[in-house]
Structures are given as C-alpha cells and as structure tokens.
Image (cartoon, rainbow, N blue to C red):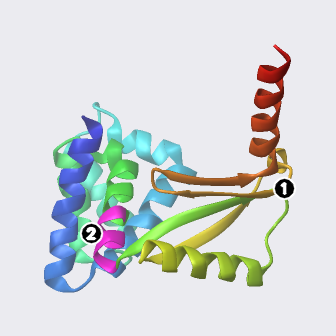
Amino acid sequence: MAKLVASRYANALFEVGVLEGTTAALNDELKVIVDLFNENEDFLKILRAPLISKEEKKALVEKIYDNKASLEMMNFLKVLIDKDRIGIIDEIFTEFKTLINEKENILEAVAITAVPMSEKDLNNLKQKLSETKGKNITLKNEVDSSVIGGVLVKMGNEEIDGTIKTRLEKLKDQLSQIIA
C-alpha cells in the first residue's frame, strides 16, 4: 500500500519535473532532503508529530529550506505535510529515481566482490552489461568477503551469480547427492 501511495506522489513530482524540464534538479533536491531526514531522524519525527500543527510544520520547512529548495520542491513538501505523507519520503524518492531511470534508459546495478574492483574491470563489466541489456548501466562495487571470489551482479530483480561461494555450494550439493 505504501509503495502505491509513494508511486503516486513520485509520479506527480515527476510530471511537474517533465513539464518544467527539471527532473534531474528535483531528483538532486529530493536526495539532499531524504539524506537530511536520514541523518537527522528527530527532524523527521517533528514533521510527523500529530501534536504539531501542519501550519507550524510548513513554517519550519520554509524556514529551513528557504532559498535552498526550488518552489516546486517547497510546494511538494507542503503537500506531503498536508496529506500526512512526509513519513514515506524515502519511498517516494526511490519511486522518483525509478521513473527517471526509465526515462533515461538507465539500469542500476551492483557488483559484489570479495575485494574492490579496479576501475578498468568495473568499466569492462559495465560495458558488457550495457551491451547485454541494451541500457545505460550505472554500476557500483560493493565488497563482501563472504563471496570468496568472482562477482555477483544485482540489477533490479535479476542476479548474475558468478561467485566461487555459489559454485562451492553447488559442488557440495552434487557430492552429497552422490554419497547419500
């Protein structure tokens, strides 16, 4: 349910961005605001508190973001406060980012490796994934020593598992079936 509501608000903001030609700027602004809320949970708690009036919350947002946020973003935050939806701003940002990625034909991916990948290897993997998927790939590398070696690539709902850990688990299963 929350995802559906977040999707509607993200779509509304996205449409404003498309009309004004400011989708990238709105995305950047929304990211800064979400990061601020995540770093300062007390601020978000204040904006969600039922004992504080909506007018006081909007005045607080205006004071904090005055000359720092666009008029569209200020109005969007005020609507979220009016509708008691400020608490799902994280989900709204995720949905908004998805809409931008669809528009720009971008697919976000994560390459999980045991050790950090070199810039050359990261670029080569990014190029191969772009060719395979027919999309512009944004790729970041995460390190997880439990993969032992190889690469696990996560793109949306899809995983490409080329890790030694998975190969060893499959070999273990095969051996246990033979022995049993």
Report whether 148 appears left or right of 142: right
Q: Quadrant of the N terminus?
A: top left
Up the image or down, 115 lies above or below 26; here it is: above
**Along the viewing direction, whichever of 42 and 53 lies nearer the viewer:** 42
Mark 2: which amino acid? Met
Q: Which residue is mark 1?
A: 149
Precedes in sequence: disc 1 or disc 2: 2
Specify whether residue 55 is in view. no
Q: CA distance from mark 1 to mark 2?
A: 44 Å
The residue tagged 2 is 73
Q: Where, quadrant-wise, is the C terminus in this rendering?
A: top right
Q: Amino acid at mark 1?
A: Gly
Asked if residue 33 lies in the magenta stretch, the reply is no
Q: Residue at x 40, y 51 (%)?
A: 90
- x, y (%) of residue 87? 34, 42
Region in magenta? 98-104
- Seen at 50% across and 78% down, the residue is 130
Q: Is 102 in the magenta?
A: yes
Q: Nearer the viewer, residue 177 or 122?
A: 177
Of residues 128 and 75, the one drawn nearer to the viewer in this rendering: 128
Assign the magenta stretch its main secondary structure.
helix
- Going by the image, does 166 lie left or right of 91? right
